[in-house]
Image (cartoon, coloured by chain):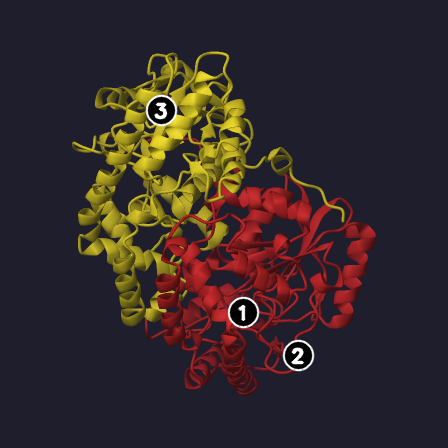
Chain colours: A red, B yellow
């Protein structure tokens, strides 16, 4: 067999997370490695009803090809939630596809693309298909630092941000910082991509205003039903200014024609009567309890010199080990002891910090969180 | 709002077919323009049962994230049908996504890509995202002519073919021609992409061997459940040699993580007990009858000088008008008379033939086929 791979394919490497997840499928492993929502939160009975209703009331529309833009009623619902118009909303096959499409219509080879430090690995993978030059914006516990942004923004195609409970760090960008970023973006003509799969998952208090709501002409907003309903349906969305939306629709048509009509209509059945608004607080409560359990165990078992944040929502805690320690080496020992996590290095577009790691707590019951953190703590003590 | 589009996005144009379909949604229009399967063929009652079974027996797996490669049982079933191995099978979000992924891993800017004359518009759109140089291989009523292929194959990344009841022409590549193409491909080190969404839809007689079955090391095979089960589920697949499969999996992960777990499992429920094999003959019968009705009406109403083929399967008839006639102009008059079709020009990668058009008969009942063809015939008479 002979064939020539494209330049981008020659550079492709598999996701470290996915490879690790394969190892951790053994039931005896306590895995803090996943990015999966807890299946305890899936409203199975409701989805059964909604699915039946879709197949009873609109079987042909649910099973036939549909418009590339998505199911109109769903687009209207999404638009209303974001003070936007359905004509700005594109339904995507998970919000991951939004990243693929935005990369295609905005990135040329060597285009400058600004990302947080660290950032979502899946976004780096999606954008990499268009071979950009990634620029890591210096970031602190409140997200990207605005001081250097005006300089870095020059000739950049966009800046990619996760404002709420970021994957991998769990951090949230505070209101004041959001406003600074939006102001600089407007001044510099910098497009902001706001990826918000976790925004609904705050443990307490109200959601912060999206950057999109502060300037819908300069901020593209991405959302998802994966973390609040079920990821196996693969329904996400992109809200973009008209001129960009039209190009995204064309790119989407070439990519998969449209997102399954069937799953879009099931999602719509689940939201139209307000069910999602009743359902989300149960997810927040579960995740908040598990986060608290993990933070409590970490404070008891992790040795001095190890640092971590206290997330206000979402699915992840970010851990920084003492300088010089390598979390990949720790992972080898952890897996031998039947505990898994994700090393932090792959989440950096530049200058990976080998002494960082990501812990997910949402799929692990509190007693196993206790056991797993205790094991990690003893491994860290003995390093 | 200021932003810079990528080169590829600046070149993007909307599908002529999609734009026309929007016009033809009025119920009074007799539309031969669609590429949609007939909803009369959707096994709604069965899909209702299968959906319920999936949500009863494996709700968590159906609603959770799943492997990028696809649901293993489904991959094994597909592999068995193609004398392949599950490790060569990637489940895709419709076979359109297969085109997107293959383009990404095989095409660099200005790479030579061989296509039939004419070819599937959606493939041109998908591959265009990677900005290749398209080379139209001279083709006759039996598909691409092999005489010139050895010369054209030089430095080409691949040749893209639809061997069965091609969209748009409805033609099938005969066995002898398939073998010639496979032999030349092997001699020249040319990768063949075999796109086969319509292969199961022959009106009579057995299916011809796939080119993939003749040389699985040199031929990538794409298939779909859209035309035999339901397109709204968006489930297709790519069977590729190992080294290429691995790259496709990585590209797929970046594109949408995976195809919905839910729809994959519904498809598997529909095939595992042999239901699809009982179901497909009913589609063949319906489409064969409607094809016959259209051919009969064309022979009675179309004037001398208009030529067309007699498909042995699939959804399309290809019409060639006398030289100098423009089917786009005919379309304007046809739509004014409430009949629609698709002009042929957009299906050509180079040198569009303005005097061609595509007719689809599968969604139109015989009495409306008669009426619509009669109207087209009278418009052609008066041109």
State the residue in front, A161 or A210. Answer: A210
The answer for how far apart the CA atoms under marks 1 and 3 are is 45 Å
Q: Which residue is mark 3?
A: B189
Give x and y (percent) for residue A89.
60, 55
Disc 1 vs disc 2: which is toward the camera?
2
Decide: is A318 above or below A15: below
> Given the image, what chain letter belongs to the residue carrying mark 1?
A
Have a look at marks 1 and 3 and say if they share a chain.
Answer: no
Q: Residue at point 31% right, 63% down?
A: B51
Chain of the residue under label 3: B
Q: Secondary structure at mark 1?
A: strand
Considering the numbered disc 3 on the image, is that residue within a helix, a strand or a loop?
loop
Residue A114 on image: x %, y %: 69, 52
Q: Are marks 1 and 3 in contact (CB under 8 Å)?
A: no
Q: Residue at x 52, y 80 (%)?
A: A278
For label 2, count other residues whose C-alpha is less than 10 Å away and answer few (under 14), some (14-19) or many (20+): few
Q: Using the rendered image of the protein, determine whether residue A198 is visible from the camera's viewpoint.
A: yes
Frontmost residue, A65 versus A302: A65
Which residue is the site of mark 2?
Answer: A206
Find residue A358 and name its label.
1
Considering depth in this image, is A365 or B16 the residue closer to the camera? B16
**Dot 2 and dot 3 within a common chain:** no
State which quarter of the image contains the N terminus of chain A.
top left
Task: Say above or below: B32 vs B272.
Answer: above
Residue A145 appears in which quarter of the rendering?
A: bottom right
Q: Residues within 10 Å of mark 3 (few under 14, many from 20)?
A: many
Residue at 25% of width from left, 43% of height from top?
Answer: B283
């Amino acid at each position: 067999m002979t064939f020539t791979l494209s330049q981008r394919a020659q550079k492709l490497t598999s996701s470290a997370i996915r490879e690790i997840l394969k190892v951790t499928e053994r039931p005896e492993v306590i895995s803090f490695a996943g990015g999966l929502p807890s299946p305890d939160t899936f409203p199975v009975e409701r989805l059964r009803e909604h699915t039946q209703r879709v197949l009873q009331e609109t079987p042909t529309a649910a099973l036939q090809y549909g418009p590339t833009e998505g199911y109109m009623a769903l687009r209207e619902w999404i638009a209303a939630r974001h003070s936007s118009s359905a004509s700005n909303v594109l339904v995507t096959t998970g919000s991951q596809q939004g990243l693929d499409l935005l990369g295609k219509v905005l990135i040329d080879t060597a285009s400058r693309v600004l990302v947080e430090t660290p950032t979502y690995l899946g976004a780096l993978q999606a954008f990499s298909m268009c071979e950009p030059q990634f620029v890591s914006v210096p970031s602190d516990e409140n997200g990207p630092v605005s001081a250097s942004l005006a300089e870095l923004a020059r000739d950049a195609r966009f800046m990619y941000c996760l404002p709420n409970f970021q994957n991998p760090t769990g951090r949230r960008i505070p209101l004041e910082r959001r406003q600074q970023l939006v102001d600089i973006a407007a001044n510099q003509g910098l497009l902001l991509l706001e990826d918000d799969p976790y925004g609904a998952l705050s443990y307490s208090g109200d959601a912060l205003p999206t950057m999109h709501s502060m300037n819908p002409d300069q901020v593209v907003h991405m959302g998802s039903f994966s973390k609040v309903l079920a990821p196996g349906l693969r329904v996400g969305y992109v809200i973009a200014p008209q001129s960009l939306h039209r190009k995204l629709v064309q790119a989407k048509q070439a990519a998969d024609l449209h997102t399954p009509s069937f799953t879009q209509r099931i999602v719509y059945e689940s939201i139209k009567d307000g069910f999602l608004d009743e359902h989300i607080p149960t997810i927040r409560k579960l995740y908040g309890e598990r986060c608290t359990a993990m933070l409590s165990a970490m404070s008891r078992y992790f040795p001095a010199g190890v640092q971590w944040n206290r997330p206000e929502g979402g699915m992840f805690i970010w851990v920084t080990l003492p300088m010089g320690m390598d979390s990949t080496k720790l992972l080898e020992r952890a897996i031998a002891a039947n505990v898994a996590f994700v090393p932090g290095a792959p989440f950096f577009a530049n200058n990976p910090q080998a002494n960082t790691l990501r812990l997910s707590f949402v799929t692990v019951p509190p007693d196993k969180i206790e056991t797993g953190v205790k094991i990690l703590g003893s491994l860290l003590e003995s390093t």
